[in-house]
Image (cartoon, rainbow, N blue to C red):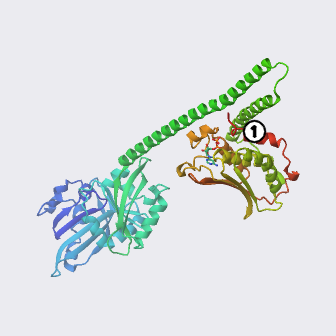
Amino acid sequence: MDNINVLFWNLKDEFTVTMANRTLANFFGREQQFYNMKNMDCNHLTSGEIELIFADNQAVFREKKKVSLEKWISDSTGKLKLLSITKTPKLNKNGEVASVFCTAIDITEKASLKKALDITIDNLSASEKFFNLNFQEASNGILLSDKNGRMILFNEALCEILQYPMEELIKINLFDITHQEDLPKSKYLRNMLVNNRIKKFKMEQRLLTGNGNYIWVNMSSRLANGGHAELIISYIEDIGERKSAEETIKEQQAEIESKRVELEFNKLKNKFFANLSHEFRTPLNLIFATLHLMESNLDRNKEHVPYEKMKSYINIIRQNSYRLLRLVHNLIDLTKMDINDYHLNLKKCDIVSLVKQIIEPVKSYMEENNREFIYNNQLEKREIICDPVNIERIILNLLSNAIKFTRVGDQIILSLREEKEEIIISVRDTGIGIKKDKLDLIFEEFRQVDESFSRGSEGTGLGLPITKYLVELHGGTITVKSKYGEGSEFIVRLPIKRDDSVFTEESPAGKIEDLTNKVDMEFSDIYCG
Ligand code: ADP
């Protein structure tokens, strides 16, 4: 019961002090043992001591009633202090006074404090419990506070933790030194406590010290026993070291994670550049090889070059030039998209005729590659606001993937329908499918899910990220469903924008120039040499 901001002593009889705390000894500048002397000689005591410790005792012992009074008492330096004194008799079974429990609190500086103290002292069962805590050994802070955060009693350990002298700390409200981020939770839990909704709670929170720094503490709180005053006892443990160790570990983990991400990204980047070189080299090799063949054919048959042969050479060169062109386009666009410098050219157009136009030249690719292509349109004319060139790119990309990742005889189904103010374009196939754990990756740049397979058909893993970006620029979404070994479905949802006043320019029948060239370009991966 030492080191609290309350002067405390216990009387066995009118003249015998059985226990006194250090605050009392300090107040009168005594050694702590001083008051434990059996038969105290009044000659050795100051008038202040007599006035505080022994005056009024007779009445308490005789009338067996608690007394509360205020007195000006001079301390060891001769300064007068206004003390709020309470002496409470404790009766034994026979109704005799066994001891008297006395407290005094310095209220010189803060009269308003008196009320709080009165509440505390009145509520003796609470304060007595509080005094009975082993204060001396407590290395943790112990605090008795009311529901409004008023700090009523506390021990010296709390002063040390919070780096305030006792006389300063008593003036402070707990809520004023609680960190803003912790305050709502702390208030909520304290309310739950005083409303008896919970019995106790533990909370890690930050408190502002006298030095102006926040420290982490673990506060275990419960209601002080009984009483109307709704007092809360809290044990406050300084967990700064543990927290900073945790912080360090967290920082280290974050550093490791960022290094791991960086490494992973570098690996991905290297793989991408390796792929990219391959992507550039293969068509270039094919173009050079074909040129070489053309040249030797020309040399051999100077006058009469076989038409069919030449035509097939030209086709190879064209297709591989398209592959290079597509690659360059994709790289340039992705760079623009990365810096948000890619813009749509929005127009009002009929999505039904646009899709019809897009798939017309695709059909021959499907046939040549022995895929069964089904177009399932459930819409009549339906005008939406979109960028036809980029809608074409979205659909061609999904269809070219569908060819790449299916086998001879597989089905590719393109469906067009409307659902809740959205146009749904779905490209479903009965191809190789995508493993579950890879589904989230395919929309990320540079990801090719199945390297072994995609080696057979070419690709850099840029198609889907670009497609996703374009769909999102239209305010839409793209999702994928897939079962490995059974097939995949890519679903594009485009909002049907009603407010089309801004877009006066119409695109009748969605005229797209050079459509065949674009299809050739988007499908150039498929005929790889
Ligand atoms: P690319 O086709 O150039 O490799 P994409 O970004 O278009 O790049 O596709 C990324 C990956 O997603 C592909 O490598 C493939 O593994 C997977 N993928 C895309 N479409 C399909 C599909 N229809 N069926 C199975 N896998 C697919």
**Quadrant of res 117:** bottom left
Quarter of the image with the N terminus in it: bottom left
**Quadrant of res 62:** bottom left
Q: Position of residue 509 (x, y in %)?
A: 86, 52
Q: Please, is residue 35 above or below residue 367 in the view?
A: below
Instruction: Identify the residue at horizontal 64%, vertical 54% (top origin).
Output: 489
Instruction: Identify the residue at horizontal 75%, vertical 38% (top origin).
Output: 521
**Element type at marker 1?**
helix
Amino acid tagged 1: Met
Q: Position of residue 494 (x, y in %)?
A: 73, 56
Q: Report which residue position mark 1 lands on.
A: 521
Left or right: 204 with respect to 99? right
* Foreground of the two, 172 or 133: 133
* Foreground of the two, 136 or 35: 136
Quarter of the image with the C terminus in it: top right
Tag 1: Cα neighbours inside 10 Å, few (<14), some, or many (≥20)?
many
Tag count: 1
Q: Please, is residue 160 above or below residue 68 in the view?
A: above
Residue 504 visible from this viewpoint: no
* Foreground of the two, 493 or 480: 480
